[in-house]
Amino acid sequence: MITEPLLINKNPKGGLRTLPFIIANEAFERMASMGLMPNMILYLCGEYNMETTAGTNVLLIWTAATNFLPIIGAFLADSCVGRYPMIGFGCITYLLGVVLLWLTTILSQAQPPACDQLRSDCESATWSQLMLLYSALGLMSLGGGGIRSSSLAFGAEQLEKGDENKSKGALQSYFSWYYVSVLASSMVAVTCIVYIQDNLGWKVGFGVPAVISLLSALSFFLASPFYVQSKANTSLLTGLIQVLVASYKNRHIKLSSQTTEEMYHPRKGSMLLVPSENLRCLNKACIIKHPGQDSTPDRRASNPWSLCTVDQVEELKALIKVIPLWSTGIMIAVTISQSSFPVLQASTMDRHITPNFEIPSGSFGIFTIITVILWIGFYDRILQPIASKIRGKPCQLRLKQRMGIGLLFSTASMAAWAITETVRRNIAINEGISDDPRAVVKMSAMWVLPYHVLSGLAMAFNMIGQIEFYYSELPRSMSSIASALHGLGMSVASLVASFIMNAVDEITKRGGKEGWIPSNINKGRYDYYYWLLAGLNMASFIYFLACCKAYGPCREEASEALDEKDGMEEEC
């Protein structure tokens, strides 16, 4: 009998055979989500008669929820329900949300009466119509949070419990294919699905993501008999909260000037026996007050909410230390979250590549993705090896340098965007079409490429650098927190972007003025709004420099300094 090598496994469950189903599940979910996002502002303004600011607010809040809910999902999966039930719940919920959104395009009662956008007396959507729309978006965010929170870790879990001899190499391969599939699905979404929406209408354009969501759910559940399903355990987030509670409970303990005078509670098998001197108030959480009562014979805390380990305390300290640098990435995420305005801008420009083909306005984001891919390949395969060969030793940009360069690119992208909008608006006025927000000016949409290219470079430098920074600076036991920080930053940035936009709209409309960001892009001053964001990005860069100085050297910098010192001593 000929057997398939991948199916030969000491453990009847798990292994490589389960990975294609997990990767397909995540890839299809991302494809559906990314396919709906670019043109959603056109759908809200055109079909629900929303103002540009109102529609953008809906999308920003939706994005914030989509980025934040995976953090909640990860916490619940780790501490309560487990990863398999969490992903399963996410698949079903997400499918319901997409189908509900698709129904809004089919049911005539789900939308307000059609109205020309040039009119000012269009009927607004009713409360029930908006509730149906918001319920669809909410279910999609909830379902996406369930899938994204556990998918990557669930796949790694299959290898750890399955192919033990090859787990390390297989794990690296799995991570690579996972991110490649997510990137590839995003590219298909912003090109093919957006093109379908532009040319075949909303019913077909939203029906395709519904079918893709069904494929996502089926691909996950088909392999259910073969999955390794580990039970939920204590979450790392719970441990961090325990440190705060225990330090508050023990706030009356007076710390001595010498750390060695107290008796601390180490984690079993850990080499860390004494906490560090920074943020000493947290050290009270791991002080043993009554040796015979506070811990059990096997060295476990009798009450983990009153006594924590030294490792738990140091993990919380490491997290607190990176928070200021984490906050410097919020502004660049605010810039990236302005996804609605580029679509509106491109829709009023000449997007023809040939006389018979034009790029959909929602597909220009593909240039940002391509820029990220090209830069990563160029940096890793060409620039870094050449620089290392010239210097005769490994040479690469440090993490904080990459983050700072990314902020400068983000500033430049907003400046390029503002210049493009100034030129486009002047052309619209000179052509006498400023009263028609749907009119196409005689200006190539390729003018928006500098913005997308610079945004891609900002993401490649800053956002990827941020993720690597968290992974390198936080303890290995906090890898899940490191990945969650990025999502949390994107969530906070969406709310900040909504606040900035609403504040600008409210202030600039005072006195009966048109305002900077009205629904008619030709009547507003979107270029002023982009210059404001460019200025905020530059202020964020200055804040970043101050945070870098306060943070001190990273681990990689300390390691390089130590290597240089050892080299000098050897030469002497």
Image (cartoon, helix red, strand yellow):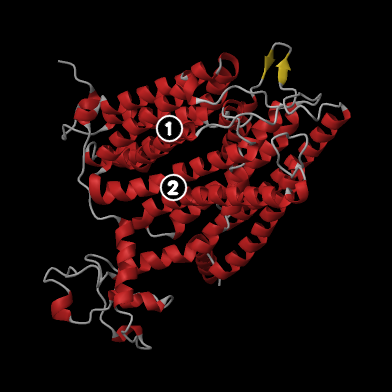
Image coordinates of residue 285 in percent, x first then y, are: 30, 74
Q: In the rendered image, is residue 14 in sight? A: yes
> The disc labelled 2 sits on which kind of residue?
Phe
Q: Quadrant of residue 225?
A: top left
How packed mark 2 is, by other alpha carbons closer than 10 Å (few <14, some 14-19, many 20 or more), is: many
> Does 39 appear above or below 472?
above
458 lies left or right of 414: left
| Along the viewing direction, whichever of 109 and 186 lies nearer the viewer | 109
Residue 389 appears anywhere in the view: no
Is residue 390 shown left or right of residue 22? Answer: right
Which of 363/124 is in front? 124
Q: If the image is split into quadrants, where does the C terminus sit?
A: bottom right
Q: Nearer the viewer, residue 298 or 286?
A: 286
Reading the image, the residue beneath label 1 is 136
Left or right of 546? Residue 5 is left
Please tell me whether mark 1 or mark 2 is closer to you in this view: 1
Q: Secondary structure at mark 1?
A: helix
